[in-house]
Amino acid sequence: MDHFFLMIWHALLVALFFSFLWRTARRERIHLFLKTFLIMVVGGVLAGWLMYPFP
Amino acid sequence: MTKKSQKNNEDPSTQPDNPVPLPLLGAAWLIPGLGHLILGKRICAAVFFGVITAGFVTGVLLEGEVGVPMAENPFSWLSTLACAGNGVLYIFRLIWLNGLGPLLSNIPLGLDGGGDPVAAGFGYGKTFLITAGLMNLLAVLDVSDIARGAKN
């Protein structure tokens, strides 16, 4: 499996879980889901690029 | 009644805690989402069951190793605790790998956690298995909070 796909799949599951665990209103759940999902995916890619010069 | 005393009555931290039935927590741990289903939170129950089961199955398909205690590695107890959070999924996986007889005779040490350390997905698989277990443990704590009346 593609590593990027696995990262997205993991972020999707975790973001979905916490949006339902921590929020009750539908709108708040969508907001938290998008926020946590994007932080994990974009943060992961960004961390990967920052580590790129290092051996 | 003064405003201050009214405020204290509304504050959940000042309310007496309801006792949490242990069978409820056991059911919530054993089958992901069952605790929320018993408490009438059907959507949460369905989501938690789906997410935790999907995470566990992904971990197994990626050749990840479920945590089993090892005498020479004290940290293995932590991964065992996290993976055991998956409840019946963890138990079924151990039975699948070890068989019921050897499983019971080899507890706690000497169990096979499965997985292939050479497989490309070994580390990812273990991450999925541990994450799924920890999410279920958080769901159990959530069930406890709801049953105590500390959360709606």
Image (cartoon, coloured by chain):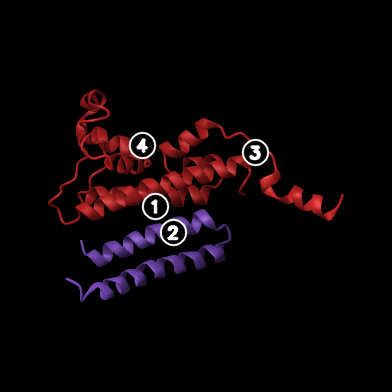
For residue B88, which numbered disc appears in the image?
Answer: 4
Residue identified by numbered label 1: B51
Asked whether the beta carbons under mark 4 and mark 3 sit within 8 Å of each other, the answer is no
Find residue B17 and name its label. Answer: 3
Looking at the colours in the rendered structure, which chain would you say is drawn in purple? A
The chain to which mark 3 is attached is B
Cα distance between the residues tagged 4 and 3: 29 Å
Single out the mark in the foreground, 4 or 3.
Answer: 3
- Amino acid, disc 1: Val
Q: Mark 4 — on which chain does it sit?
A: B
Q: Which residue type carries mark 2?
A: Leu
Is A34 displayed left or right of B152 in the figure? Answer: left
Q: Residue at x 27, y 39 (%)?
A: B74
2 and 1 marks in contact (CB < 8 Å): yes
Above or below B111: residue B40 = below
Residue B132 percent across, percent down from the top left: 36, 49
* Alpha carbon separation for disc pair 2 and 4: 22 Å
